[in-house]
Amino acid sequence: MEQRELGRTGHKSTVVTFGTAGIGRVEQDVADKAIERIIEHGVNHIDIAPSYGEAMERLAPWIPEIRDKVFLGSKTTVRTKREAWDEVRSIFRRLGVESFDLFQVHAVATMDDLDQVTAPCGALETLVEMREQGVTRWLGITGHGPEAPRVHLEALRRFDFDTIMFPLNAALHANPDYRRDADALLAEARSRNVGIQIIKSIARGGWGDHEREHTTWYDPHRDQDDIDRALWWLLSQDIHTAPSAGDVVLLPRVLDAAERFKPLSAERQDEIVQGQRPPLPEPRLGILPVA
């Protein structure tokens, strides 16, 4: 699988990161198979969070074997410094690690979220202290939602984050407002050598009132050809890595697509965007109804 340098971190991350949300609500044997699979495919970057059910407990038995072989990122959704430190200590205990490569303020999707984490005694102060104490080397910000690119652009003006993580996919690219804001964020990130992690790579729309066929909160592409097109479109952009979808059934298809990736022409990329037909919109991402 192709590797790309994650901005100033210098780590050459595989183009697909193991997004562990998918193992947070399955039994250990199912999680074990997923972890074995990412190891077989050479995935060298793992993203985990305390909000992902029991993902930490599922990954913990593997830590002694894999910790020195992977770039490990985690995050916190709490907004104050004191609460963030409490959660950080809990994360260390649950996962059985002594340090992270990357730690991020998580789910910063609105300006109000950003104001909270960057305020005096906000969660960002915890991350800075973690870096000073040597328990993380790099600091990042994550978030999803229609405002995320604009919010993260402002975040980079307020603090010199090492990485960003936000949604982008072919369906979202069809939204002109989102595309404009995402392009501005990506340009700023590249100018600062910020690591670019992209989530929701295979989202095609929303579930609405329909029964969910997968554990992702958005409606994902599920056929191999559709996943190929979605992931190859994204990896043809100037980004670094994409956490896998939070569904263990889809994981093998995403890994397979990543291993067969070759950059697409600009014409083919446009065709993929124009071919997106979300069965239902997903306003929480910014995926619009079909015109």
Image (cartoon, rainbow, N blue to C red):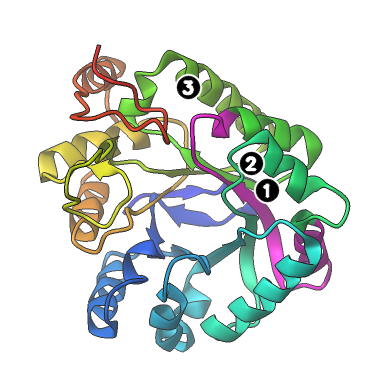
Percent across and percent down for residue 272 are: 22, 23
Camera-near label (3 vs 2) is 3
Within 10 Å of disc 3 (Cα), the crowding (few <14, some 14-19, many 20+) is: many
Q: Seen from this angle, which residue lies furthest front?
A: 209
Left or right: 177 as drawn, with respect to 250: right
- Pinpoint residue 200: horizontal percent, then vertical percent: 37, 43
| Position of the N terminus by quadrant | bottom left
Residue at label 3?
Answer: 178
Q: Reply above or below: 90 against 103.
A: below
Residue at the spot of label 2: 194
Mark closer to the chain start, 3 or 2: 3
Of callouts 1 and 3, which one flags the residue occurring earlier in the amino acid sequence? 1
Give whichever of discs 2 and 1 has the lower sequence position.
1
244 in relation to 279, above or below: below
Q: Tell me the SS state at disc 3.
A: helix
- Secondary structure beneath label 1: loop
Residue 132 appears in which quarter of the rendering?
bottom right
Amino acid type shown at disc 3:
Tyr
Q: Position of residue 244 (x, y in %)?
A: 34, 54
Answer above or below: position of 37 versus 9: below
Q: Residue furthest right?
A: 120
Mark 2 and mark 1: Cα distance apart in space: 5 Å
- Report whether 32 appears left or right of 137: left
Residue at image location 24% in from the left, 41% down from the top: 207
Residue that carries the numbered disc 1 in the rendered image: 162
Give the CA distance from mark 1 to mark 3.
23 Å
Q: Report the magenta residues as a range.
A: 125-149
The kind of residue tagged 1 is Asp
